[in-house]
């Protein structure tokens, strides 16, 4: 019974388990079907949702584009309105300007109309006056014609008188220069330079600086006597004019300008610039405001002022140097320096001196002087010594020939202005020159000594006395 009961129980259990499993399987299948149904519904819902989102996004983008396009159209319209407004403003300003111009022209026309009415009334009165008194007017015109002819004649007589007085002025000017002395000596004191050694400047006094400016006193070294007294010896010197360290080139030229005028008047003038190496001779002669540029400038100005008196001038310039007693053409080719020979020719009958084979430049403008000064400076012999780092090693002579002719009076003149920049004198024990430089220094010092002999002989003024012109080339 028990076993039967157990078998029945097992059968029930088996049936129950089978039913349970069948129920679970059915339930699981139903759940799976529900899950698939829900998932499909969810996917479909998502797809529908995405479609709706895309539709809404597209609609929104389209709406935004429409709004942006509308905004851009409004901006374009606004910009067009602004441009139109600017054009209108410009047109208004232009119209105002035109209006102002028209008003000004209208006012000017009104003024001209008033002036024309005044002129018409004046002319009508003048016509009436002429018609009423033609005879008296004819007489007045005749008187005016006579007065004009008299004025023309007086002007011609005055011009003739000026020409005569110009000739007289030349003679009197030359007499004044002769009274002042045909040989004059000026002294110019160079200011100290930063490159000068300390305490190397001489002590110089100018006793008559406020009056004649013709004297200088060079103070010697202090000496102590046996009694303890300290004295300073003074060395006085007198010149025709003294220029202190503060003087300018224009001040110096003020003294020689009358000599330059003499050259223009037809006389031969020679101006030497002499001094020790480094004393400023070349600066005085050839600087931008030196004697050469200032002299040429004065000559041009004076020549132009004399044109109304009938004078016409031709000016010729040349530049030479005397180096080791040999002549060089400073305006020639640099390769010809110290090679091409030049000779000094004297025409005693005509009183003229010429130099062979030198370059002559027509000076038809003051600016050409700067050109020839530069050419001469490039060619001039310059070397280095202990006395001066750019010591001029030769004498240079600027020769300016002035040929004038008066087309009215027939007068002619031919003068020569020689402006000489002498080489610097040096003490051999100071300059330290040797070899070729020693030869240069000896020739320079010899020629300067010979020049001193010539000037001394001329200064004595003995009639028939010997003047040693031929002792050196620079004297010829």
Image (cartoon, grey):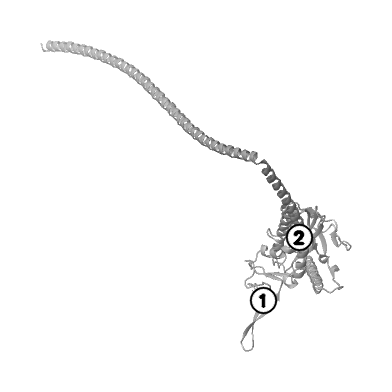
* Disc nearer the start of the sequence (2/1): 2
Number of on-image labels? 2
Q: Quadrant of residue 466?
A: bottom right
Q: In which quarter of the image is residue 122?
A: top right
In the rendered image, the residue lying farthest to the left is: 1
The image shows residue 312 at horizontal and vertical percentages of 78, 53
Residue under the point 31% across and 18% down? 49
Quadrant assignment for the N terminus: top left
Asked if the residue at tag 1 contacts the one at tag 2, i.e. Cβ–Cβ closer than 8 Å, the answer is no
The image's mark for residue 109 is: none
Q: How crowded is mark 2: few (under 14 residues within 10 Å), some or many (20 or more)?
A: few
Q: Look at mark 2 in the image and give the residue it sits on.
A: 165
Residue under the point 80% across and 53% down? 408
Side of 105 relative to 227 (left or right): left
Q: Is residue 160 visible?
A: yes
Secondary element under disc 1, as helix, strand or loop, is: strand
Q: Can residue 368 be seen in this view?
A: no
Q: Quadrant of residue 223?
A: bottom right
Of 336 and 299, the residue lying toward us: 299
Q: Nearer the viewer, mark 2 or mark 1?
A: 2
380 to 67, vertically: above or below: below
Side of 197 relative to 335 (left or right): left
Q: Look at mark 1 in the image and give the residue it sits on.
A: 217
23 to 267, vertically: above or below: above
Side of 252 relative to 456 (left or right): left
Of 426 and 176, the residue lying toward us: 176
In the rendered image, the residue lying farthest to the bottom is: 227
The image shows residue 340 at horizontal and vertical percentages of 84, 57
The image shows residue 446 at horizontal and vertical percentages of 80, 70
Quadrant assignment for the C terminus: bottom right
In 3D space, how far apart are the residues under numbered discs 2 and 1 (Cα atoms)?
43 Å
Q: How crowded is mark 1: few (under 14 residues within 10 Å), some or many (20 or more)?
A: some
């Amino acid at each position: 019974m028990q076993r039967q009961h157990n078998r029945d129980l097992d059968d029930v259990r088996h049936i129950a388990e089978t039913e349970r499993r069948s129920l679970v399987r059915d339930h699981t299948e139903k759940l799976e079907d529900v899950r698939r149904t829900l998932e499909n519904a969810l996917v479909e819902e998502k797809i529908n949702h995405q479609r709706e989102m895309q539709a809404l996004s597209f609609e929104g983008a389209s709406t935004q584009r429409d709004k942006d396009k509308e905004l851009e159209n409004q901006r374009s319209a606004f910009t067009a309105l602004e441009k139109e407004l600017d054009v209108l403003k410009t047109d208004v300003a232009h119209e105002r300007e035109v209006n102002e111009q028209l008003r000004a022209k209208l006012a000017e026309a009104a003024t001209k109309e008033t002036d024309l009415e005044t002129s018409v009334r004046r002319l009508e009165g003048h016509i009436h006056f002429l018609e009423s008194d033609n005879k008296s007017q004819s007489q007045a015109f005749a008187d005016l014609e006579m007065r004009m002819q008299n004025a023309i004649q007086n002007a011609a007589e005055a011009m003739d008188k000026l020409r005569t007085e110009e000739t007289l002025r030349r003679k009197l000017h030359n007499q004044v220069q002769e009274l002042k002395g045909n040989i004059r000596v000026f002294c110019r004191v160079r200011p100290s330079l930063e490159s000068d050694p300390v305490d190397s400047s001489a002590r110089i006094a100018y006793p008559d600086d406020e009056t004649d400016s013709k004297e200088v006193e060079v103070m010697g070294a202090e000496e102590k006597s046996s009694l303890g007294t300290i004295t300073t010896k003074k060395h006085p010197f007198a010149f025709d004019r003294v220029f202190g360290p503060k003087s300018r080139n224009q001040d110096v030229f003020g003294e020689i300008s009358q000599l330059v005028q003499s050259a223009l008047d037809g006389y031969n003038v020679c101006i030497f610039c002499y001094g020790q190496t480094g004393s400023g001779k070349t600066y005085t002669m050839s600087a931008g405001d030196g004697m050469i540029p200032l002299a040429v400038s004065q000559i041009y100005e004076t020549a132009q002022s004399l044109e109304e008196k009938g004078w016409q001038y031709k000016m010729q310039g040349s530049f030479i140097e005397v180096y080791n007693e040999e002549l060089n053409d400073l305006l020639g080719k640099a390769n010809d320096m110290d090679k091409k020979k030049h000779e000094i020719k004297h025409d005693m009958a005509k009183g003229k001196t010429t130099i062979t084979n030198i370059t002559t430049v027509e000076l038809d403008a003051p600016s050409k002087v700067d050109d020839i000064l530069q050419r001469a400076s490039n060619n001039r012999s310059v070397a280095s010594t202990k006395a001066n780092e750019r010591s001029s090693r030769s004498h240079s002579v600027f020769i300016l020939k002035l040929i004038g002719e008066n087309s009215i009076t027939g007068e002619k003149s031919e003068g020569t202005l020689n402006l000489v920049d002498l080489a610097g004198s040096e003490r051999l024990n100071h300059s330290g020159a040797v070899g070729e430089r020693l030869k240069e220094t000896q020739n320079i010092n010899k020629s300067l000594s010979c020049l001193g002999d010539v000037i001394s002989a001329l200064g004595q003024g003995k009639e028939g006395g010997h003047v040693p012109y031929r002792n050196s080339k620079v004297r010829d």
